[in-house]
């Protein structure tokens, strides 16, 4: 019996320790670094880029001649907040003939904070409390008169 208790305690201890093992999550599309290095500005076409790297994560909205490949790796330990290990964005720009103009690689160090504007659009009408909204319609509707 003591043997089962001893092994049971060891199993519980191992289960508790394995629950604290970090979990690495990979999100996005991280192209092969050798394939990215093989892209030559002025020579590689859009079709060749798609063949080498696959479809982009997204395309430019305002500049439609830009492809973005985005990826992120995070590590989560137990219930704690995920920790960013690596974030990479590869931007490939094309000219009018769909030939690569340039390849840019952005990392976490290249990020910029964006200030949000908190504007409120005024609306017409009254601001009602919850109670006024719930009971405001009582007595407003007349019966059918029959």
Image (spheres, helix red, strand yellow):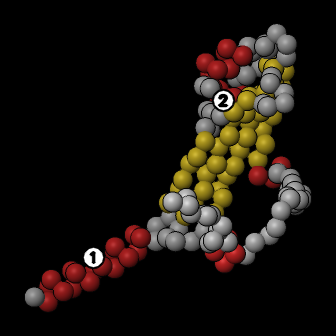
| Residue at x-position 34% and y-position 79% | 13
Nearer to us in this view, 116 or 128: 128
- Percent across and percent down for residue 68 are 72, 33
Residues at badges 2 and 1 in contact (C-beta under 8 Å)? no
Answer with left or right where residue 111 lies relative to residue 141: right
| Residue at x-position 62% and y-position 64% | 141
| Residue at x-position 34% and y-position 74% | 14
Nearer to us in this view, 124 or 7: 124
**In this rendering, the label closer to the viewer, 2 or 1:** 2
- Percent across and percent down for residue 136 are 67, 72
Q: Which is more N-terminal, label 1 or label 2?
A: 1
Q: What is the quadrant of residue 45 in the picture? A: top right
Q: What is the quadrant of residue 70 in the picture? A: top right
Q: Secondary structure at mark 1?
A: helix
Answer with left or right where residue 96 lies relative to residue 16: right
**Which quadrant does the N terminus fall into?**
bottom left
Could one spot residue 33 in this view of the protein? Answer: no
Dot 1 crowding, Cα within 10 Å, few <14, some 14–19, many 20+: few
Nearer to us in this view, 29 or 129: 129
């Amino acid at each position: 019996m003591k043997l089962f208790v001893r092994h049971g305690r060891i199993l519980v201890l191992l289960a508790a320790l394995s629950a604290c093992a970090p979990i690495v999550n990979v999100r996005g599309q991280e192209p092969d670094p050798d394939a990215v290095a093989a892209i030559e500005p002025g020579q590689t076409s859009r079709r060749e880029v798609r063949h080498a790297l696959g479809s982009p994560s997204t395309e430019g909205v305002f500049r439609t001649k830009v492809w973005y490949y985005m990826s992120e790796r995070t590590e989560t330990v137990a219930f704690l907040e995920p920790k960013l290990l690596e974030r990479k964005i590869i931007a490939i720009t094309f000219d009018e003939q769909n030939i690569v103009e340039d390849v840019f690689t952005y990392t976490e160090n290249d990020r910029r904070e964006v200030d949000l504007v908190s504007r409120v659009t005024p609306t017409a009408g009254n601001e009602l409390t919850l109670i006024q909204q719930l009971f405001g319609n009582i007595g407003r509707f007349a019966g059918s008169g029959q």
